[in-house]
Amino acid sequence: MSRSRIARGVAFPAGNPPSIDPRAPRAASLARWLGAALLLLLPASSLFAQAPPPSLDARLAAVEAAAKSAQSAGDNAWMLVSAALVLMMTGPGLALFYGGLVRRKNVLSTMMHSFILMAVVTVLWAVYGYSLSFGEGTAFLGDFRYLFLNGVGAAPNPDYAATIPQQTFMVYQLMFAIITPALISGAYAERMKFSAMLMFTVLWTTFVYFPMAHMVWGKGGLLNAFLGGKIPCFDFAGGTVVHITSGVSALVCALYLGKRKGYLSEPMKPHSLTFSFVGAALLWVGWFGFNAGSALAASPLATSAFVATHFGAAAATLGWILAEWIHNGKPSMLGGISGAVAGLVAITPASGFVKPFPAMLIGFAAGIVCFLMVTAVKGRFGYDDTLDAFGVHGIGGTLGALLTGVFATSLVNDSLKDSSGKTLPLGWVDGNAAQVLNQLGGVAISWVLAIAGSLIILKIVDLTIGVRVRPDEEDEGLDISLHGEEGYNFEA
Amino acid sequence: MKKIEAIIQPHKLEDVKNALTAIGVEGMTISEVRGHGRQKGHKEVYRGMEYQVDLLPKVKLEMVVPDARSADAIQAISTAARTGKIGDGKIFVFDVQEAIRIRNDDRGEGAL
């Protein structure tokens, strides 16, 4: 008892002696050493006065229980931090990144697009979102077994993550459901009604995101390579679920809503690239929770995903800047942060399957391809994807999903096994070239679902409450016309 | 009394302020402004969107001085703000009808 007191450095009341906390292995081992030293100092007679030691089996069981509890504690700590990191990507990360890119009269409305989803999607998730995504259900959609989070508590769900409470898994996955619709807001910023945006998002999350999350990550989902999917598609952290669905839906929104008033005739420069920089840097850091957290444990796989994520982002930054430097003659900071985000998007599906150098290759390719998308291709087709949600997330996500089929290797991730327990090859580099076709299947399904879902939902919203603000409201700016406030009050 | 309005390059503000302090000019009002004279603007590119920017950042100084001091003040400003390149700015001089100190209702040059 006194050992414990020394080890934790905390004075406990004498009448309530604590046991050594197995979740603190360092403290416990220190305590053991101190205890051994104390034993040596004791007179021999006191040793013989102790009760007989417990049997070997009992001690073994105790050690096993302690080891399991320690792993669970380590995994849970990492997953809770990861969940917080992913939420940080939406607010403040995405809110600042997008908020800085719009004109000053729309800064608050744009930040609101991200922020309000932290509230709206959370409620949907608690009521039926988690259940529709991760209940077993069919190949396309979950069921209602976890309605109102029924049965989602401290006990792990071994199908998904055997060492952490299911509640941790649930709240971690929620953060992905929040950021995905927030990414779409880059396409409709500066011209969509707030009420329409809410209605669109509630329907979109329900009919596009939840089914897609179930297909890729849910037990029995159509594309889930690890839990019995018919089309085994590798998507470690959401290249299809998050980035393709949001990016492609963004293009549909941009086309449906039409261009902003004055597009190409009035200046529409970003009002604060310093905001955007801070936001992008927060996204980069938060992405470690997004990708490395997708290992669902504080494991070597999490480390591998962490490394791949960072390397991919670095190479993509250089790719975009290089392309821009050659094309425009000047390397810009907006180019650098756009490249970083493009690389993070592209490495997302691959992060838990590829080695560091393929990760850099994927990132570098994404930096250059996404640069060409938002400059050459967007200019040529003339759609007004305000903040390039499609060019970065749609295209970067698609590229990453396909390249995952090329570079995924069982040397990094050996969790795909046949019925006899033998590790199976993953991507083309493992000799499984057909995986690229599976990835293509996953990409095609997410594109089709995003296009069809978004188009139908936009039509419904348009026919009921209308999607776009009035021209005079657009001129005045959405901050004042929709929210009754301004981002910058000089008279204050 | 003369009002002197000088539009200068922002990076020359400190030099101009020092030069005015050195000859004993007390009090001025400064604002950040944008504008252009004959100076050409520059090109900015944001993700492939090009903008020709004509209105460049400048600093505007305003001060009112006694008639006897105006020539010195103008000289100090133009010397300190000059780089010799296009875009150095302009100085405008106005006659001032009256000056009033709000605190105690002083009038004329005594209020400066």
Image: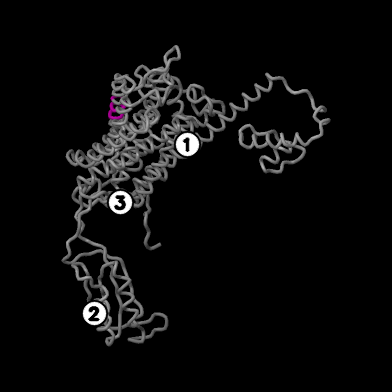
Say whether mark 3 and mark 2 are on the same chain. Answer: no
Tell me where the magenta segment starts and ends, as one range. Answer: A444-452
From the viewer's perspective, tell me whether residue B12 is left or right of residue A202: left
Q: Residues within 10 Å of mark 2 (few under 14, many from 20)?
A: few
| Residue B40 placement: quadrant | bottom left
Query: How many numbered marks appear?
Result: 3
Pointer 1 chain: A
Q: How far separated are the C-alphas under marks 1 and 2?
A: 64 Å
Q: Main secondary structure of the magenta part?
A: helix
Disc 2 residue type (three-letter): Phe
Closer to us: B25 or A264? B25
Please tell me whether residue A445 belongs to the stretch shown in magenta: yes
Disc 1 residue type (three-letter): Ala
Q: Which residue is mark 3?
A: A477
| Dot label at residue B94 | 2
Residue in view at x 71 percent, y 43 percent: A11
Q: Residues within 10 Å of mark 1 (few under 14, many from 20)?
A: many
Task: Tell me which label, 1 or 3, sits earlier in the chain.
Answer: 1
| Dot label at residue A275 | none
From the viewer's perspective, tell me whether residue A97 is left or right of residue B58: right
Disc 3 residue type (three-letter): Gly
Residue in view at x 37 percent, y 61 percent: A490
Quarter of the image with the C terminus of chain A in it: bottom left
Q: Position of residue A345 (x, y in %)?
A: 34, 36
